[in-house]
Amino acid sequence: MAKSQQSFNKKEKEKKRLKKRQDKMLKKEERKANSDGGGLENMMAYVDENGQITDTPPDPTIKKVKIKAEDIEIGIPKKEIDPDANADKTGKVDYFDSSKGFGFIIDSNTQMKYFYHISGCIDEINEGDKVTFELEKGMKGMNAVRVKKL
């Protein structure tokens, strides 16, 4: 006569598995009983005229504002050119490196620093000299050109 193929350990594992399955079914039934049954309507979100997310649908009686396609600007608006950018400005040479041939000028009105190169100078200039100059757009900002000693 052969022994039973089911050991005590196998029986206990089977009981735990069945108990787990029953608990899962009870939780599922509980969720079904407690749900409001709204389904998709409860999950819907709407965007109002101000761009805010709400749970109420938009009111069709509200007048809509029409916008022309020409009024919409895509990108960054172009920077306006300063009218007195080409006018002669005065300043003081803050730094000058004669070996490399460049320096910086501080504008006496705005206290802004402008780069200048020796090739843009009309007169010979040293550190601390008062100068007049014009501005041109360079690769890294505005550069002083046509620099003259006062």
Image: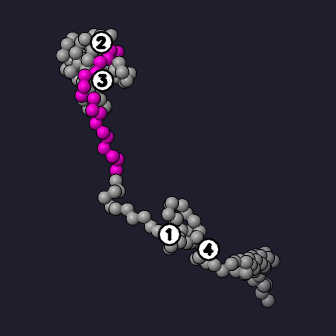
Inter-mark Cα distance, 2 to 4? 74 Å
Place residue 126 in its image quadrant.
top left
Q: Position of residue 17 (x, y in %)?
A: 74, 77
Residue at disc 3, secondary structure: strand
**Secondary structure at numbered mark 1:** loop
Report the residue at 31% width, 15% height from top: 93
Q: Secondary structure at mark 2?
A: strand
Question: Where, quadrant-wise, is the C terminus in this rendering?
Answer: top left
**Which tag, 1 or 3, sits closer to the chain's start?**
1
Residue stretch rendered in magenta on the structure: 75-95
Q: Amino acid at mark 1?
A: Ile
Residue placed under numbered mark 2 in the picture? 130
Secondary structure beneath label 4: helix
Residue most extreme to the right? 8
Residue 140 coordinates in the image, percent (x, y): 31, 32
> Which residue sits at x=28%, y=21%?
89
Where residue 98 sits, quadrant-wise, is: top left
For the residues marked 1 and 3, what is the alpha-carbon distance in whole angstroms? 57 Å
Residue visible at 55% across and 63% down? 53
Q: Which residue is mark 3?
A: 115
- The answer to if 120 sits in the magenta stretch is no
> Does residue 103 appear left or right of residue 30 in this picture?
left
Q: Name the one closer to the observer, 17 or 44.
A: 44
Residue 90 screen position, x and y as percent: 29, 18
Q: Which residue is mark 1?
A: 62
- Compared with residue 104, is residue 73 higher up or lower down, i.e. above or below? below
Amino acid, disc 3: Phe
